[in-house]
Image: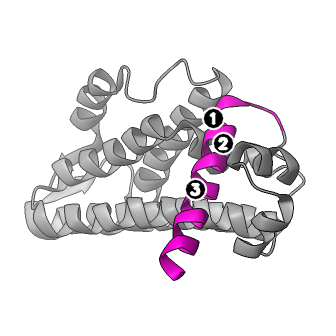
């Protein structure tokens, strides 16, 4: 029974993510979501007590997907510049592969929803920025490199790039992909991001 319930929860979340992707700018109603899943609204509420909890389920998926991989990058990659590139590329690649989630990451889909959801999204980016700060700090200790503009400004600059590319993706209705010209951009950025001590 529990497995069947988890399958239905997953199905609901997948349908919600698909609707976020296919209906840019549109508000998702529980009636439309129930229709998409093929269940009644009451059935939705048996699995999630509110629409906010459904969005939280997607945010948890984002967090788990990103931070599990970021932790692996930090543990397995010793080169700081490569770590930074891999983290930024991971987030941009995740965004590109999950367009519906981008509407959450930009808070576009959260208009009119509870403030708690916007706070959760802010926390996702704050955690990524904190991880980048940690990696940048290690550059001096492990490789004798220092950021060209200080640790906090450097990490914030990288977050601004990530958020900007995701927002552009949403604004273009998923036509301008975050990874499209990222390799060329990274080449220029990497040359100017860190300086030798």
Q: Are marks 2 and 3 in contact (CB under 8 Å)?
A: no
Residue for point 78% across, 66% down: 43
Estimate how packed mark 2 is, as few (under 14), some (14 to 19) or many (20 or more) residues with alpha carbons within 10 Å: many
Give coordinates of residue 111: x percent, y percent. Answer: 85, 49
Left of 158 or right of it: where is 172?
Answer: right
The residue singled out by tag 1 in the image is 21
Q: Which quadrant of the view contains residue 164?
A: top right
Q: Given the current orientation, which residue lies at the most extreme bottom position? A: 2
Q: Is residue 183 above or below residue 48?
A: above
Q: Is residue 39 magenta?
A: no
* Crowdedness near tag 1: few (<14), some (14–19) or many (≥20) residues, C-alpha within 10 Å: many
The span shown in magenta is 1-26
Identify the disc placed on residue 11.
3
- Which residue in the rendered view is the most extreme toward the right? 112
Q: Nearer the viewer, mark 3 or mark 1?
A: 3
User: Is residue 130 left or right of 15 when viewed as pictured?
Assistant: left
Q: Circle 2 is placed at which residue position?
A: 103
The answer for how far apart the CA atoms under marks 2 and 3 are is: 19 Å
Q: x%, y% of residue 121?
A: 63, 60
Secondary structure at badge 2 equals helix
6 or 13, nearer to the observer: 6
Q: Is 117 situated above or below 21?
A: below
């Amino acid at each position: 029974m529990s497995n069947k319930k988890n399958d239905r929860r997953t199905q609901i979340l997948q349908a919600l993510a698909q609707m976020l992707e296919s209906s840019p700018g549109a508000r998702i109603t529980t009636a439309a979501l129930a229709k998409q899943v093929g269940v009644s609204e009451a059935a939705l509420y048996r699995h999630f007590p509110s629409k906010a909890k459904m969005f939280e389920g997607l945010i948890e998926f984002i967090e788990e997907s990103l931070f599990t991989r970021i932790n692996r990058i930090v543990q397995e990659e010793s080169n700081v510049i490569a770590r930074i590139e891999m983290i930024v590329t991971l987030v941009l690649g995740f965004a590109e592969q999950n367009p519906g989630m981008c509407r959450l990451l930009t808070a576009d889909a959260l208009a009119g929803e509870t403030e708690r959801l916007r706070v959760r999204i802010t926390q996702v980016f704050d955690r990524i920025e904190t991880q980048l700060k940690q990696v940048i700090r290690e550059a001096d200790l492990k490789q004798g490199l220092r950021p060209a503009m200080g640790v906090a400004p450097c990490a914030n600059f990288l977050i601004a790039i990530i958020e900007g590319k995701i927002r552009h993706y949403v604004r273009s209705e998923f036509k301008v992909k975050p990874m499209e010209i990222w390799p060329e951009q990274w080449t220029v950025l990497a040359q100017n991001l860190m300086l030798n001590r």
